[in-house]
């Protein structure tokens, strides 16, 4: 990922600066541009008047056809001036990679093709769609018959609804991620996380409710109103998911 590449380049540059500082005294007859970090790449010690080249600071999908050639062909250039100062680096070719060959770049929403991964994604997507269809059918059946409506069934319907939302979002998220629709997925993390937390909360609520029916709580006539369950299942889930982002 780009962040790890930059971190590695920064560390390399710090080491080179320390090394070159110890040998500067012996190079009094020559003019050099010393090691320099430009916030993306580390430029090593270069003689004045020369043009240094580095590969673009990307992680490439080398198993994609043509991407290895892209990695080797597109570079960053930076000139060492005659007075020993660095000119501004030229990232024009790297910008061209982003514009014209984005499929070669590994990023947050861009992943390299992998047969096993694709198979797992397809199976997960298929099962998610089937689960949504079955759960929606169950919800319709639960809602048709008025004679069976009760607190336990209401909790069960909310649990089923949370799983419908969870698997729907999972399916849409999988399609969006594999098709590289989003340039940056960080803004869309909250929705899958919220649906996941909501389904877990409703499982906890249903488990707690069923447990209370078989313990001493079953002898008590006082029970929590519906809005308490709804707040804990849907409202509290939103609070927890926002805290994690």
Image: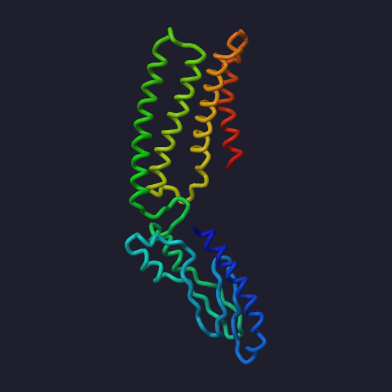
Up-down relation of residue 76 to residue 162 (above or below): below
Which residue of the protein is positioned furthest toward the bottom in this rendering?
29
The quadrant of the picture occupied by the C terminus is top right
98 left or right of 12 in image: left
233 left or right of 97 in image: right
Among the 4 quarters of the image, the one containing residue 135: top left
Q: Which residue lies at the image location 52% right of the left edge and 35% below the top edge? A: 194
Up-down relation of residue 128 to residue 57 (above or below): above
Q: How is the image coloured?
A: rainbow
How far across and how far down the image is residue 107, in percent?
46, 55
How far across and how far down the image is residue 168, in percent?
41, 33
Along the line of sight, the residue nearer the viewer: 127 or 145: 127
How far across and how far down the image is residue 134, in percent?
36, 25
Which residue of the protein is positioned furthest toward the front in this rendering?
215
How far across and how far down the image is residue 200, in percent?
52, 30
Along the line of sight, the residue nearer the viewer: 138 or 87: 138
Among the 4 quarters of the image, the one containing residue 72: bottom left
Among the 4 quarters of the image, the one containing residue 41: bottom right
Q: Which residue lies at the image location 51% right of the left edge and 59% below the top edge? A: 2
Q: Which residue lies at the image location 52% right of the left edge and 47% below the top edge? A: 186
Up-down relation of residue 115 to residue 13 (above or below): above
Q: Which residue lies at the image location 61% right of the left edge and 79% below the top edge? A: 34
Could you tell me how many numbered marks the image carries? 0
């Amino acid at each position: 990922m780009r962040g790890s590449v930059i971190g590695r380049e920064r560390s390399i540059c710090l080491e080179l600066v320390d090394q070159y500082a110890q040998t500067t005294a012996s190079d009094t007859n020559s003019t050099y541009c010393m090691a320099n970090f430009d916030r993306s790449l580390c430029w090593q010690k270069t003689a004045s008047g020369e043009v240094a080249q580095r590969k673009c600071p990307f992680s490439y999908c080398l198993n994609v056809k043509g991407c290895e050639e892209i990695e080797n062909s597109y570079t960053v250039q930076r000139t060492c001036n005659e007075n020993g100062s660095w000119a501004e680096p030229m990232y024009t070719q790297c910008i061209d990679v982003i514009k014209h060959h984005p499929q070669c770049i590994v990023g947050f929403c861009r992943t390299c093709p992998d047969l096993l991964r694709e198979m797992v994604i397809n199976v997960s997507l298929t099962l998610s769609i089937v689960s949504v269809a079955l759960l929606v059918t169950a919800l319709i059946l639960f809602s048709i018959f008025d004679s069976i409506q009760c607190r336990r069934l209401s909790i069960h319907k909310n649990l089923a609804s949370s799983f419908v939302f969870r698997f729907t979002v999972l399916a849409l998220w999988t399609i969006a991620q594999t098709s590289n629709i989003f340039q940056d997925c960080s803004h869309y993390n909250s929705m899958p996380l919220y649906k996941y937390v909501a389904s877990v909360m409703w499982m906890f609520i249903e488990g707690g409710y069923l447990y209370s029916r078989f313990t001493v709580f079953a002898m008590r006539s006082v029970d929590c109103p519906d809005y308490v369950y709804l707040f804990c299942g849907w409202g509290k889930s939103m609070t927890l998911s926002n805290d994690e982002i």
